[in-house]
């Protein structure tokens, strides 16, 4: 699976942030614990002192009354168990639980310590020793107060909750903003991706870097340098094909003229005449191929500014029909047109003429004698749709995409170069249009539809049909 830059950046930011939040959470826990311990120990010390204060001599002996205030200190919702033990130096229990353990070193200063009762419950305890004097006698009394720790644990929770809430909220907000920020900031990169991905192979203009982040510019510059080299390479190649085709034209014309001359001179030798006729067919075929190659090279090298002119499509169609009418008649095909008035498309006139010529030529060439070919051009809000409709054999659905490939031909029975539709598509794309092939009505024949952009000078006029120039 490809690595997502957004996820990687998110991890880079969120992992350290989560670590910081964890560390801060731990510190908050320690602080809450210390505070709760301090409060618990203070309460235990206070309780122990209150009890200690109430130890007194009674009839020459030490005795204690446990004041309720000493135990009320620990009242809480958690209902902790409180234990106490008051014992004389001679280990005489004055009051309380006898199994409450002593600290390691009882002292006159109240000492908090952790301990465990006989039944296994752990408690926090405070012990202190008080000296009692009476008529020269001294008695040491140890007071121990202990309690279970439920209220202390609850206090830790109470102290910690707002901190944890704040920290989790910070983390969530950070995640949200980082995610939003990355989505927002990565948009130019996504646009760059769309720009590069959406290009057709012949579109070799540099990528615009002005809306991009400073950090992305070097990448775009590198891509643009690469594009420039590719463009240079493509130009050199196209120029070579164009030059070669051009160079081939003159000798081919000469050969044709020479064969023509030889044919006229040698009418007696039938095999030779046959051979010369074959040679002439080949040379003419080669001549047509050269013309098509030249046209394809021209279409491919057309610059955007060259195809931004305004072409009168009605005039172009008229001239093409005029040119091909003899061919249509020779094949006994009914050639006609249905055109909206005043159709102006954006493009180059020579290329648009080549586009229409190739489509009509195909329709005439592949439709059986007696067939019908109609050129339809209609104007919509934003485009002009040109259709060349015939009732010939059509193109099988599986071959419709492939016929645009160079040199691809469906049947090799007829003469052709396999470049016509490649040229048509190249011109349509260059002029900002598109082409599609569909079967005709009832699956008969072929409809070649080309959508062309409206020319800027196109005057707005309502559509009406002109069934004109019907030939044959
Ligand atoms: N109007 C049409 N009717 C039937 N087949 C067609 C039509 N136009 C094109 N084709 C098929 O598409 C193939 C490619 O056409 P094209 O690129 O013009 O090359 P070419 O005409 O030189 O063979 C043709 O060989 C032909 O089989
Ligand atoms: Mg053709």
Image: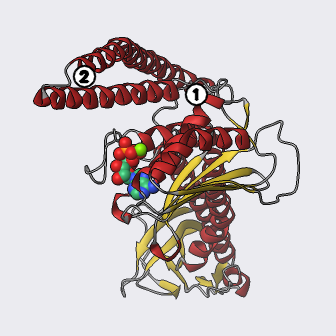
The residue drawn where x is 56% and y is 79% is: 150
Q: Is mark 1 within 8 Å of ligand 1?
A: no
Label 1 close to label 2 by CB (< 8 Å): no
**Which one is in front, 147 or 60?**
147
Q: Where, by quadrant of the figure, is residue 134 drawn?
A: bottom right
Q: Residue at x 45, y 17 (%)?
A: 235
Q: Residue 54 carries which label?
A: none
Rounded to the nearest whole Å, what is the CA distance between mark 1 and mark 2?
A: 58 Å
Question: Label 2: which residue?
Answer: 263
Coordinates of residue 213 in the picture (x, y in percent): 63, 28
Measured as percent of width and height from the top left, residue 62 is found at: 58, 81
- Pair 1/2: label in front: 2
Residue 212: image location, x then y, percent:
64, 30
Q: Which residue is drawn at 37% across and 14% down?
A: 240
Q: Is mark 1 on a helix, strand or loop?
A: loop
Is residue 348 visible in the rendered image? The answer is: no
Which numbered disc flags the more N-terminal residue, 1 or 2?
Answer: 1
Q: Is residue 386 visible?
A: yes
Quarter holding the C terminus is: bottom right
In the rendered image, residue 18, in percent from the top left (x then y), is placed at 52, 51
State whether residue 264 is above or below residue 380: above
């Amino acid at each position: 699976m490809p690595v997502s830059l957004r996820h990687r950046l998110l991890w880079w930011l969120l992992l350290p942030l989560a670590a910081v939040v964890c560390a801060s959470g731990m510190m908050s826990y320690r602080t809450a614990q210390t505070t709760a311990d301090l409060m618990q120990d203070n309460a235990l010390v206070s309780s122990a002192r209150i009890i200690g204060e109430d130890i007194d001599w009674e009839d020459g002996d030490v005795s204690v009354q446990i004041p309720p205030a000493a135990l009320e200190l620990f009242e809480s919702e958690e209902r902790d168990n409180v234990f106490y033990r008051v014992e004389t130096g001679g280990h005489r229990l004055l009051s309380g639980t006898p199994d409450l353990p002593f600290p390691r070193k009882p002292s006159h200063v109240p000492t908090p310590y952790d301990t465990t009762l006989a039944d296994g419950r752990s408690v926090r305890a405070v012990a202190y020793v008080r000296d009692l004097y009476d008529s020269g006698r001294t008695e040491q009394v140890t007071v121990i107060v202990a309690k279970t720790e439920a209220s202390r644990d609850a206090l830790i929770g109470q102290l910690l909750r707002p901190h944890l809430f704040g920290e989790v909220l910070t983390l969530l907000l950070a995640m949200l903003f980082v995610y939003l920020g990355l989505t927002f900031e990565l948009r130019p990169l996504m646009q760059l991706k769309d720009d590069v991905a959406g290009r057709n192979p012949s579109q070799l203009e540099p990528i615009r870097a002005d809306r991009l982040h400073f950090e992305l510019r070097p990448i775009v510059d590198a891509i643009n340098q690469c594009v420039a080299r590719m463009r240079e390479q493509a130009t050199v190649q196209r120029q070579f094909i164009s030059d070669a085709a051009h160079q081939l034209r003159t000798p081919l014309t000469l050969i044709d003229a020479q064969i023509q001359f030889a044919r006229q001179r040698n009418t007696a030798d039938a095999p030779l005449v046959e051979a010369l006729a074959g040679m002439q067919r080949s040379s003419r075929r080669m001549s047509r191929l050269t013309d098509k190659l030249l046209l394809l090279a021209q279409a491919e090298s057309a610059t955007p500014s060259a195809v931004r002119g305004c072409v009168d499509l009605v005039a172009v169609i008229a001239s093409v029909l005029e040119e091909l009418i003899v061919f249509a008649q020779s094949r006994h095909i009914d050639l006609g047109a249905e055109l909206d008035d005043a159709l102006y498309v954006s493009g180059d006139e020579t290329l648009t003429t080549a586009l229409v010529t190739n489509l009509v030529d195909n329709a005439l060439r592949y439709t059986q004698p007696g067939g019908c070919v109609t050129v339809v051009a209609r104007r919509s809000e934003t485009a002009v749709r040109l259709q060349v409709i015939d009732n010939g054999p059509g193109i099988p659905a599986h071959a419709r995409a492939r016929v645009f490939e160079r040199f691809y031909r469906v049947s090799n029975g007829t003469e052709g170069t396999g470049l016509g539709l490649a040229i048509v598509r190249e011109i349509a794309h260059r002029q900002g249009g598109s082409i599609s092939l569909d079967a005709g009505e009832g699956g008969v024949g072929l409809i070649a539809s080309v959508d062309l952009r409206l020319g800027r000078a196109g005057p707005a006029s309502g559509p009406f049909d002109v069934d004109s120039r019907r030939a044959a």
